[in-house]
Image: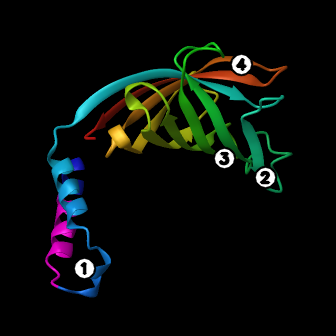
C-alpha cells in the first residue's frame, strides 16, 4: 500500500514538472520544494515506540474537554450519541498531573454509536519538548471506550513525523467520577521518513 502511494505521488509530481510554461506551472513556481519532497520519499523509514499519558479534565477550574454540539437525542441516548467535544489535554511522560510535560493533545471526539459507548476520534498529538519538539502525530479512528485496551490508527504527522503511519494502543489508566478527571495511557508504534 505504501509503495503504491509513493508511485502515485511520484507520477503526479512528474506530471506537474512536465507541463511547460502552463498556468498550472506558474501557480507552483518553487521546484525546490518538489525536489525536496522527492528526496524525502527516497529516505529510509524510521520506526519509533512512544509511551505517554494524557491528563483529561472533563470538569472543574482547569477543564480541558468541552462540549461544543449535541444531537436532539444526546440527552436521552445511553451512549450520548451525537455529542461532540473539543479537546486540549496535557500530554505527560508519567501518569501524575505534575509529570514532565511533553505536549498537548488537541482535536474532536464525537459519540458516534447508538448502541455501544464509542467515540470517533480526530486527535493531533503536538509535541512541545524533547526530540520531537514541534512535530505532530495525527490519529483518526474509532475508540470503543468500554474495552480495556483500544487500537487507533496513526494516519499522518508533521515535522519529524512526516509521512507517519502506524497504530496506537490506549487504555484508561485511572478515572475519578466525582471530579471527572481521567488519565489515559497511550503507546504509539509509528514509522516515518522525516
On the image, numbered disc 1 is attached to which residue? 25
Q: Which residue is mark 4?
A: 175
Q: Which residue is mark 3?
A: 110
Mark 1 secondary-structure assignment: helix
Q: Identify the mark nearer the N-term, 3 or 1.
A: 1
Give the distance between the C-alpha atoms of the residues marked 2 and 3, in whole angstroms: 9 Å
Q: Is residue 40 above or below residue 97?
A: below
Q: Give how far across and how far down residue 18 sits, in percent.
A: 13, 77
* Residue appearing at x 44%, y 39% in the figure: 137
Tell me, yes or no, whether the two marked residues, 4 and 3, touch with CB atoms within 8 Å: no
Look at the picture and state if 88 lies above or below 130.
below
Q: Going by the image, does 99 lie left or right of 18?
A: right
Give the image location of residue 12, x and y in percent: 22, 69
Rendering coords of residue 149 (x, y %): 53, 23
- Residue that carries the numbered disc 2 in the rendered image: 70
Residue 175 image-quadrant placement: top right
Q: Nearer the viewer, residue 114 or 97?
A: 97
Q: Which mark is residue 1?
A: none
User: Callout 3: 10 Å neighbours few (<14), some, many (20+)?
Assistant: many
Picture coordinates of residue 116 (x, y %)?
67, 38
Residue at 31% x, 46% y: name it: 163
Residues at circles 2 and 3 in contact by the CB criterion of under 8 Å: no
**Left or right relative to 33: residue 140:** right
Q: What whole-number distance in Å separates the C-alpha atoms at marks 1 and 4? A: 55 Å
Label 4 CA crowd tier, 10 Å (few <14, some 14–19, many 20+)? some
Q: Which residues are magenta?
A: 6-20
Q: Main secondary structure of the magenta part?
A: helix
Q: Is residue 63 magenta?
A: no
Amino acid at each position: 500500500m505504501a509503495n503504491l502511494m509513493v508511485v502515485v505521488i511520484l507520477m503526479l509530481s512528474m506530471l506537474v514538472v512536465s507541463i511547460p510554461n502552463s498556468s498550472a506551472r506558474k501557480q507552483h513556481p518553487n521546484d525546490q520544494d518538489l525536489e525536496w519532497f522527492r528526496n524525502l520519499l527516497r529516505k529510509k523509514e524510521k520506526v519509533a515506540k512512544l509511551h505517554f499519558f494524557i491528563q483529561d479534565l472533563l470538569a472543574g477550574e482547569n477543564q480541558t474537554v468541552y462540549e461544543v454540539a449535541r444531537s436532539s437525542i444526546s440527552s436521552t441516548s445511553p451512549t450520548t450519541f451525537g455529542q461532540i467535544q473539543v479537546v486540549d489535554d496535557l500530554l505527560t511522560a508519567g501518569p501524575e498531573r505534575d509529570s514532565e510535560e511533553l505536549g498537548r493533545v488537541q482535536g474532536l471526539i464525537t459519540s458516534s454509536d447508538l448502541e455501544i459507548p464509542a467515540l470517533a476520534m480526530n486527535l493531533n498529538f503536538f509535541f512541545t519538548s524533547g526530540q520531537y519538539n514541534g512535530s505532530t502525530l495525527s490519529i483518526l479512528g474509532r475508540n470503543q471506550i468500554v474495552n480495556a485496551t483500544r487500537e487507533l490508527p496513526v494516519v499522518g504527522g508533521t515535522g519529524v513525523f512526516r509521512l507517519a503511519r502506524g497504530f496506537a494502543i490506549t487504555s484508561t489508566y485511572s478515572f475519578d467520577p466525582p471530579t471527572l478527571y481521567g488519565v489515559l495511557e497511550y503507546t504509539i508504534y509509528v514509522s516515518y521518513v522525516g
